[in-house]
Image: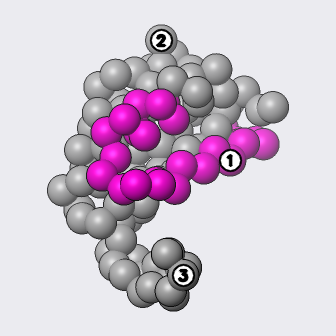
């Protein structure tokens, strides 16, 4: 696995997204987070296709913090089954990526 990861989740309000983002950074589980939205999500839930506005939270972290960050988000999320996805970062600015690691210690 890459040394650096972007973890993303979605939620139903800007307030909830900001709280998830701030909580992850305050706990040093992510170096930084962006809140994007509203976005339109189309998904199947409980047998029906749903269309809902959501806000996406993207959190940059070190790979060794992903499990703790995932648990942190799941514990605080309002959804029954929240989307929490980790995508490896395969390249980028060495200085920035070093900062990501430093800020998650």
SS for callout 3: loop
Q: Residue at x 41, y 39 (%)?
A: 73
Q: Quadrant of residue 51?
A: bottom left
Residue 102: x %, y % from top left = 51, 16
SS for callout 2: loop
Earlier residue among tags 1 and 3: 3
Q: Residue at x 45, y 25 (%)?
A: 29
Stretch of the chain drawn in magenta: 69-93
- The residue at which mark 2 appears reads as 105
Residue 17 as seen in the image, left or right of residue 50: left
Q: Residue at x 68, y 47 (%)?
A: 87
Label 2 to label 1: alpha-carbon separation: 20 Å
Q: Which mark is residue 48?
A: none
Residue 67 as seen in the image, left or right of residue 37: right
- The residue at which mark 1 appears reads as 87
Label 1 to label 3: alpha-carbon separation: 28 Å
- The residue at which mark 3 appears reads as 47
SS for callout 1: strand
Q: Extreme front residue here? A: 47
Q: Residue at x 47, y 54 (%)?
A: 81
């Amino acid at each position: 696995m890459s040394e650096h990861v972007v973890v993303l989740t979605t939620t139903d309000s800007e307030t909830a997204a900001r709280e998830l983002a701030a909580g992850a950074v305050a706990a040093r589980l992510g170096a930084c987070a962006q809140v994007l939205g509203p976005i339109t999500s189309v998904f199947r839930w409980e047998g029906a296709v749903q269309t809902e506005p959501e806000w996406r939270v993207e959190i940059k972290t070190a790979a060794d913090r992903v499990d703790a960050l995932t648990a942190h988000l799941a514990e605080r999320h309002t959804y029954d089954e929240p989307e929490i996805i980790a995508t490896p970062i395969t390249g980028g600015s060495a200085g920035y990526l070093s900062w990501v690691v430093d800020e998650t210690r």
